[in-house]
Amino acid sequence: MVVDDHSLTRQLAIDLLQLEGYEVREAAGGEIALEIAFEDNLDLILLDVSMPEMDGIEVCRQLKQNERTSQIPIVFMTLADDRRLRLDGLEAGGTDFLAKPLDRLELSIRVKSLIRQKRLNEDLNQSKQVLFSIARAIECRCNDTQNPSERLVDLAQRFGRHLQLSKLDIQNLKDAAHLHDIGTIAIPDAIILKTTPLTADERELIRQHVLIGEQLCQPVRELQGVLPIIRHHHECWDGSGYPDGIAGENIPWLAQVFQIIDIFDALTSKRPHKKPLSAAEALKILQEEAAQGWRNPELVAQFCDFSL
Ligand SMILES: [Fe+2]
């Protein structure tokens, strides 16, 4: 989409892009640009900086704040070589700048490379979505409730905010809510669904799910921050957990946080052959586990504060 209040400049950009074979939308102002962006599936926006009513910086800011449009690359078109303006543009989330009058070759190269980059990001995002779908299918085999991970995602979001974690940490916790047990895909149903006590061999096999899960998610760059949570969500504060038997603060922080909400969610959820506990009962069990030395006592105390 080309956004410029000046019709001649706008038409020139449109002509150049159409010559390259692109399908182009146009907007003569900020408001209409936002409307089109929220409705259409745009690959790139060429955005004039100085426009009456709503300027390009503000348009960019609003696009970046909306989940639907935040990934669209935005190239500012600007007359002046104004450093302040460029800094404002970058701060608002702009990707690049093009000087007016537009140079056909420069425009063509920039547009091509930014659209290629956007496609790559979409592919990566799709890999993540495929993993989420697999994880959901696995959950369905031992849960009759719909979308059980959604509860955990919500809990991750709220407890993450309570702990004042960064946006990225909270996103990693939410992704872990979907993916932490994806490794159970390699474990036979007969063992996963078994209601009688497990043999030592079967227990050992189940323990492998953290390593298999880590391996499955390893190739997706976007999930790098989730890997430690997947690997270490069954470690214990006193070192008696698995797979590495690490203890205390050696356990990655997000894995410690995740473990608390995972246990709380499991205890309070309805599962086959198990009645859900009340929040108070679940908190009591977490406190007992902390007293046993299995959980970080400070974190359990924070979780109790948060839940009450
Ligand atoms: Fe697990």
Image (cartoon, grey):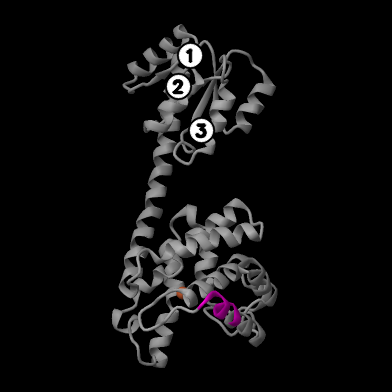
Q: Quadrant of the C terminus?
A: bottom right
Q: CA distance from mark 2 to mark 3?
A: 12 Å
Q: Is residue 178 left or right of residue 64?
A: left
Tell me what residue is drawn at x 46 percent, y 23 percent: 33
Check disc 1: other Cα within 10 Å, few if <14, some if 14-19, many if 20+. Answer: few
Image disc number at residue 32: 2
Q: Looking at the picture, how far across and down is residue 210, in whole percent?
A: 46, 73
* Residue in the image at 48% along x and 57% along y: 223
Is the residue 108 above or below the residue 301 in the image?
Answer: above
Q: Is residue 207 above or below residue 40?
A: below
Stretch in magenta: 278-284
In-image side of 124 versus 224 (left or right): left
Which mark's residue is nearer the viewer, 2 or 3?
A: 2
Q: Which residue is mark 1?
A: 103
Report if the CB atoms under discs 2 and 3 are less than 8 Å apart: no
Instruction: Count residues near mark 2 (Cα–Cα under 10 Å), then give few for <14, some for 14-19, many for 20+.
Output: few
Q: Nearer the viewer, mark 3 or mark 1?
A: 3
Q: CA distance from mark 3 to mark 1?
A: 26 Å
Cα distance between the residues tagged 1 and 2? 26 Å
Q: For residue 152, which numbered disc appears in the image? A: none
Density class for disc 3 (Cα within 10 Å; few <14, some 14-19, many ≥20) is many
Q: Secondary structure at mark 1?
A: loop
Question: Disc 3 marks which residue?
Answer: 63
Amino acid on which the number 2 mark rests in the picture: Ile
